[in-house]
Amino acid sequence: MTTPLAIGVSACLLGEQVRYDGGHKHDPYITDMLGRFFRLVSVCPEVGCGLPTPRETMRLEGDPAAPRLMTTRSRVDKTGQMLAYCNAKVVELEQEDLCGFIFKKNSPSSGLFRVKVYNNGMPVKQGSGLFAAAVVRHFPLLPVEEEGRLNDAAIRENFLERVFSYRRWKDFLADKPDIGGLVDFHTRHKLLIMSHSVQQYRQMGVLVAHAVEMKKTDLFATYEEQFMKALALHASVKKQTNVLMHIMGYFKRDLTRAEKEELLDVINQYHDRLTPLIVPLTLLKHYVNKYDQPYLKQQIYLSPHPAELMLRNHV
């Protein structure tokens, strides 16, 4: 990576005492682990829009597609105040060059999924916080997640994989990109994309093959959209197993019978969920170096994020 990675984070998750009750929701994983690899950009939309700490609780009401932000006791409508802040803040965040955002779950301003929206006193979990929705609209391809969902190993790995991938794409765009560079980028990400969707990889391959027929700005914008949408798809055990077997095919003339049997056994153990993904990948990377496979050495799939994060130790 040529540029430091920045991710936005709800301020209360960083230990800042900005919640309605004057407290915080410090998440040690974000500050102590992710903080080693990312520049954490703190945002609290409620304090940012001018509300005090502590403050009266608020909730979303009305239409989940366009809810109002109301104080629960005094019944003051804070929607306009919050939306004015959101509209200005997302523009300001363009300068931060974000590669992801972690939001506080259930918040009427920052909740991303299934936020309660009240109608006639009855809550329906169909909404998004006003600020979270504004960020998603303004940065539609930005990897976003809630801190609670990051406790799921598969969701955590997918989110951070997308964050690092988005950074690589941004670096590509910043380095005088051309069609040859796009072909190289696509080639290096082949197995990573395939682990999410073979169909999407083929579709992107058609785009790259016809690159000379498009304006570069349109080409890169279309590729970026397809790239990020492909990586957002779930990389299931079945898909990962297919990629592992695909990699094994590169060694069909190199591996001894004993090595083939061992590798197949390890891949099957992963397929049967007896071992995590890191186990077959470690053995494959050993063979990549042992038998000097230059094509595989350039594949991002084998090391899409820092090993210290241990993301593939639990999926």
Image (cartoon, rainbow, N blue to C red):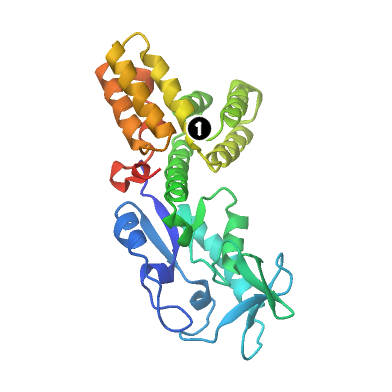
Q: Residue at position x 53%, y 41% from top?
A: 234
With 302 as the anchor, is 64 left or right in this view?
Answer: right
Quarter in which the N terminus is drawn: top left
- Nearer the observer, 198 or 37: 198
- Nearer the observer, 165 or 242: 242
Q: Amino acid at mark 1?
A: Lys
Q: Residue furthest left?
A: 290
Q: Residue at position x 45%, y 47% from top?
A: 154
Residue 279 in the image, given as x and y percentages of width and height: 32, 34
Q: Residue at position x 42%, y 26% from top?
A: 244
- Residue where numbered disc 1 is placed: 238
Q: Residue furthest top?
A: 253
Residue 303 in the image, given as x and y percentages of width and height: 35, 35
Q: Look at the picture and state if 259 lies above or below 241.
A: above
Q: Look at the picture and state if 154 lies above or below 298.
A: below
- Nearer the observer, 253 or 38: 253
Residue 121 in the image, given as x and y percentages of width and height: 70, 81
With 67 as the anchor, is 7 left or right in this view?
Answer: left
Quarter in which the C terminus is drawn: top left
With 147 as the anchor, is 197 left or right in this view?
Answer: right
Quadrant in the rendering for residue 233: top right
* Label 1 neighbour load within 10 Å: few <14, some 14-19, many 20+: few
Q: Look at the picture and state if 204 lies above or below 229.
A: above
Residue 238 in the image, given as x and y percentages of width and height: 50, 32
Per the image, label 1 sits on a secondary structure element best described as helix
Q: Inspect this view and state whether residue 149 appears.
A: yes
With 60 as the anchor, is 168 left or right in this view?
Answer: left
Q: Inspect this view and state whether residue 192 appears.
A: no
